[in-house]
Amino acid sequence: MIRKYLLLVLLFPSIYYSQTERYPVFDACKGENISDLKNCFLSTTKKHFFEEFKTPPIVENENYKGVANVLFVVTKEGDFKIIYVNSPYEEIKTEAERAFKVFPRIVPAKYNNRNIEMQFELPISFPIDAETELSTNTTKNTTDVNNQKENLLAIVEKNRIADSTFLEHNSQLNIPFTHQRYVDYEFAMHKADGTHTASKPYTYNEVNKYFDLTDFKKKFLKPEVKSWVGNKIWNEHLLQVKKKDFWLTLDFLVDVQFGKDNSDVAYTYKNSRILTVNGGLGNKFSYSATVYESQGRFADYLNSYISNRSLLTRPKNSEGLVPGRGKAKGFKEDSFDYPVAEGYLAFQPNKFMQFQFGNGKNFIGDGYRSFVLSDVSAPTTYLKMKVDFWKLQYTNIWMWNTEPSISAASNPNEHARKYIAAHYLSLNITKKLNIGFFETAISSGEQGFDAGFLNPVIFYRSVEFNRGEDAGNAIIGLTGKYKLNKNISLYSQLVVDEFSIGNLNNLSDWRNKFAYQLGAKYFNVFNVDNLFLQLEYNYARPYTFAHQSAILNYGNYSQPMAHLWGANFYEAIAIVRYTKDRWSFSTKLTLGKKGFDFEDETVSYGGNIYQSYNDRFSDTGNEIGQGNTANIFIADIQTSYLLNPSNNLSLFGSFLYRKFTPEIATNAYPAGNTVWFSAGIKADLFNWYKDF
């Protein structure tokens, strides 16, 4: 049975409480003493509102728990008028407006016998409880009145700005996936029942069920800023259009940073100009497009990776590969130019299903890394379907990948293509335990995408097997998550590329290709708000994710689709993040051991997934770190200051220390210690991994 809960708070905009002031008067309150008019008005407003207001079905069905704040006035004419409704559900706003429309015209408030407009805030908490007592704020002197007037005007102005600024919050668009930003969303979903947190990026309307995005960002708005330029810097999108049936925002952003490492390079820099457009048509269709034009010169170890001369991963007709972004061409003498374009269409036909088609990245997992599907490689063309009902969330992702280091068989001037189809089924066994099943199939692009892989409800392994013994590749995996308490969650992954059942007693057999992850997240550590701790351990056997033909490995654009390090390694990670107002701080420590191939790359030791496992070091006796063994330690410290909550433009500074000690240094992975300082201004739109 739905309970009703109402707290009606009176806010004074321009008056103070005295015997010369009178509250609005309903007909039922006429004849009351002036000292009793306030209580009569409050109780009658409560009675009228909840006799008419009906909780929308979607709010009941989704068991929403939260507060919808309704700011309204009683005008000088005695009419009720809504100024703003802050709610993640458009249906709540619509129903509140309908309820107030049937209110009768009443005698307006008066001050010194003159009609005045009086403003009120009505927080409605769900589930609703009508038995809670009402309370009001009263003022004692003129100073208090002026302060309250200023506070109310600030609230009204924040609501006005927010209502026109955060247009995407009720859309089907993705919240740009960055690990720092997603801590708040994951904590809110962790505290709720029946949530699924592995399939990322989340959409705005998905997160809004558990975390009030508008209310969170409102506190960063600056209503005192009145100039056009000031609002664009601190509050708003560069361009925003809102009409009844569509909306549009446009931003021109930058990622400009300068720094210095301990190499002979004079300085490091990154100069990205970013154009991003978001919008919606109606209530079910949204779109997004982002174009990056970038040049940069980085720390020496990163420059060595970009200009890597290896024929196994170096893009053809290119001067390098920028990790996570794509091909690069030379810029001036010692810098790189690398354009990137991303975009997608989003459609939600009903509350159970979401569809996306575009070019971008996806991530499946609860950890900092993922062996199932990560976002470390360049953007790729994808089609995604997500179904969420009962205790299930089912994600299907079809990807059209490119391998620029391999020429297409039919045209040597064209990059080879591959197709990847993935299922991920997430099931909430109990309120605390979630398990997931993952399977993916990889096929080469010469024959086009096999229509059999478009079936969203079958096992890809059987399709891959029936196509031919070596016609493709398939990987399966399991994930798990357990809510230890209200602040701590444990998570894990197990991915099997291949397993030799007959050699279970000998895990050193090269065919035992698997990887696993163990991790824990601790929100509000030791009850300190916004302090977050994460510990994670990752392990991948040699030759995992590789194939006898590189086109069939689990990779995209010369990088892994899973863990950034490929295979043949173990790694431990500790992450601490803390936010205070506009400030964010994070420290990440990475310690691991990985086996690389030697410079000539004639023998595969199992670490490079683009090396054929037919060139393997040995059939048995394979162990973690074999080959050119390297010990790796990375400390990454970052701080940022949020400028504009609408487009996530921030000032930032970073410090990175990297100690890399291979047995034999190579051109791609030179030995040595790196100390790198950097600072600048950027829009936080994606994860950029430099910890390898």
Image (cartoon, grey):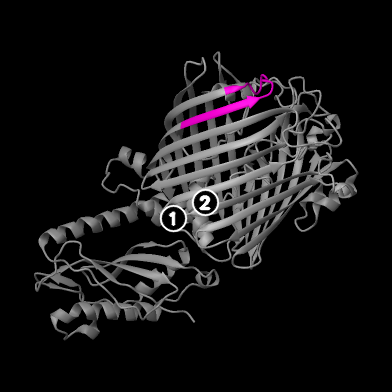
Does 523 appear in magenta? no
* SS category of the residue bearing label 1: helix
Near-viewer residue (67 or 553):
553
The residue range painted magenta reads 655-672
Q: How many marks?
A: 2
Question: Residue 93's x, y, as percent?
Answer: 42, 66
Near-viewer residue (491 or 204):
491
Q: What amino acid is labelled 2 in the image?
A: Gly
- Quarter of the image holding residue 39? bottom left
Query: What residue is shown with label 1?
Result: 526
Question: Residue 63's x, y, as percent?
Answer: 52, 70
Whether residue 255 is visible here, answered yes or no, is yes
Checking the image for residue 147, the label placed there is none
Q: Is residue 524 left or right of residue 596?
A: left
Q: Is residue 161 above or below residue 340?
A: below
- Quarter of the image holding residue 490? bottom right
Q: Is residue 337 above or below residue 589?
A: above
Q: Of circles 1 and 2, which is in front? A: 1
Question: Residue 323's x, y, as percent?
Answer: 61, 31
Q: Mark 2 Cα within 10 Å, few/some/many (few <14, many 20+)?
A: many
Q: What amino acid is labelled 1 in the image?
A: Phe
Whether residue 378 is visible here, answered yes or no, is no
Q: Is residue 570 left or right of residue 647?
A: right
Q: Residue at x 55, y 33 (%)?
A: 634
Near-viewer residue (144 or 675):
675
Q: Residue at x 77, y 48 (%)?
A: 496
Q: Mark 1 Cα within 10 Å, few/some/many (few <14, many 20+)?
A: few
Q: Is residue 633 above or below residue 31?
A: above
Checking the image for residue 280, the label placed there is 2
- Quarter of the image holding residue 104? bottom left
Between disc 1 and disc 2, whose residue precedes?
2
